[in-house]
Amino acid sequence: MAFIVTYIDMQKYIIFLFGFIPFSLSIHAQIPVDNSAQKVRLCMEYFKNGEFEKAAECFKDLHEADKTNDLYYDRYLSCLMELEKFVDADKMIRKAIKASPEKVERYVDLGQVFERLGKTNDAKEQYDKAIKLMPENQVQVSKLAIAFSNKKQYDYALQAYEKGQKGMKEKNLFSYELAGIYHLKGDAPKMVEAYLNALEFMPNRLTNVQAFLQRYLPDMTGSFDELKKQLFARMQKDATNTLYPELLIWVYILENDFESAFMQAKAMDKRLDENGARVFKLAQMAINEKQFDTALLCFEYIIKEKGSSCLYYIDSKQLLLATKRERLTAGFSYTQAEIKLLETEYEDFLKEFGKARKTATIMQELADLEAFYLINLDKAIKIMEEVIYIPMLDRNELAQAKIKLGDYYLMKGEIWESSLLYSQVDKEMKDAPIGEMARYKNAKLSYYKGDFEWAQDQLDVLKGSTSELISNDAIDVSVFIMEHLNLDTTAESMRYFAEADLLIFQNRFDDAFTAMDSLLSKFPTHGLGDDVYLTKAKVFLKKRQYDKAVEYLNKITEEYKDGILVDNALFKMAEIQEIQLKNTAKAMELYEKILMGHMGSTFTVEARKRFRRLRGDGV
């Protein structure tokens, strides 16, 4: 079967690779719709089942009846090669060549017969004859080159394309196809050169070229550097061609070198007198990749160089603030001075553009800054009260604003005001996801203030939420209450934990840790110990202190070996090792512990999938 796989499957692959209409597929159209259709199906069935003796006899009849049909020819030849009937194959191919001399690709088939017989020189003679007799016709050149490629005769495939280009006096006619051959040969410099030549010949192929380069370059050592080197050389030679710097920006992004991408994008923006669109798009990509410094450079360039008349001016100023906030608060490594400076910049923005519907998002971001980072809840509440009274505010925007305001009242301890706002949103947006979110917030509020039974009643309803996120959160809190509420008669330990939970919601992590430590000290034998460790681990994970997160997760596996959170802790540790710490071996070890020791865990399926992927199974 090896020959069949090579000849048929590789043919389809190569044709897809080079972008031609599949010749091997088009021949199916040649199957006559007459009384012989039943015989064709029978022949194909024999072939499919590997019954090559029967298939050979069957396809022989069809081929002799219609020597122009390439499907019959291909299948009959494949059968003869599988049966090692090389003399019959030789005779059949020679007759086929005589019947259709323009199909020079059949000399390649004849060469393959000689290869199988060990007659290398005779095979070479047939390949050379195919090249010599090849018509100067684009279709015929392609057919011959593909035939060579299917047989892994890559040097002859290159000869066919190069001779075809020369004969048809089109320098880069087959550059796209040549690039594919050079990839199969593992020749990165030649592949890059051919793809760039193809772009020069047909610029609208940029997207296709990028797709192939993105697929092939990572597996070819030094290929990214080679591509950049050739792009720089072409940019110096032809400064007017914008495809080269555009491709260079794309390469930098692939390498996660956003700063270099910005330098090129800025140069193109200035040279082409663009409106900042290219730089703005790059900034958005940089934000997605957490490349905040480069995103800020992009926004500052648009604001300073393009000015207020630029289409992206207001968006750049707005996103500049959001990016600064994200950069500062990610990992909670900011100083109060830095947060105060950012507060001033938000206020300056609102002075410049006013408080209206178009700036409602900025107002909410400022309120978040006040509530969570400056711990100025009164100011946060004042800002959000201004937001909810902005005229013509969208229903969803208004609902989101009310939920935020409810959160701030909750953080301040004004339970009634908070519940009232959540209830308003629940009533006004009853069937929308945001309405369910308000309902969940109200249930969580009851949990925070220690009304656990009422909270659980509400959470049980939300388990069937249309939002998977809300449903999962409701299930988690409900199960937590159910597991721990009856462990002591007063529920005092649960109130300690709920208080700590609220402090974490307020970003008051030190106070939360103090409350949890008090809980462990006062109730040393209570079953909340592993939950305390898990909660602390989540805080450290949020602060990007991964080693500390792992430390607390490991405590769960050591001190609560029979607890229900062990599999959860193992999975979170494995994730941290795999994604944040890049320790593949340790991640695999932890995933394997879940598979071997926690077969009934909800994490088993995902752990198995990740373990196999890290092992290289291709799952």
Image (cartoon, rainbow, N blue to C red):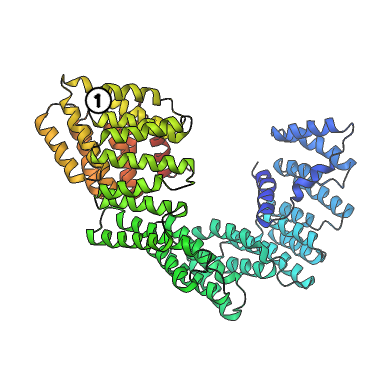
Quarter of the image where the N terminus is located: top right
- Name which quarter of the figure residue 417 lies in: top left
Q: Residues within 10 Å of mark 1 (few under 14, many from 20)?
A: some
Residue visible at 31% across and 40% down? 407
Callout 1 amino acid: Asp
Say if residue 468 shows up in the picture: no
| x then y, percent, for residue 554 | 22, 39
| x then y, percent, for residue 496 | 17, 32
Residue visible at 29% across and 22% down? 454
As helix, strand or loop, the secondary structure at mark 1 comes to loop
Is 446 left, or right, of 1 in this rendering?
left
Is 291 left, or right, of 528 in this rendering?
right
| x then y, percent, for residue 592 | 34, 36
Say if residue 9 shows up in the picture: yes
Q: Nearer the viewer, residue 314 or 472?
A: 314
User: What residue does disc 1 label?
Assistant: 451
Total numbered circles: 1
- Name which quarter of the figure residue 348 lies in: bottom left
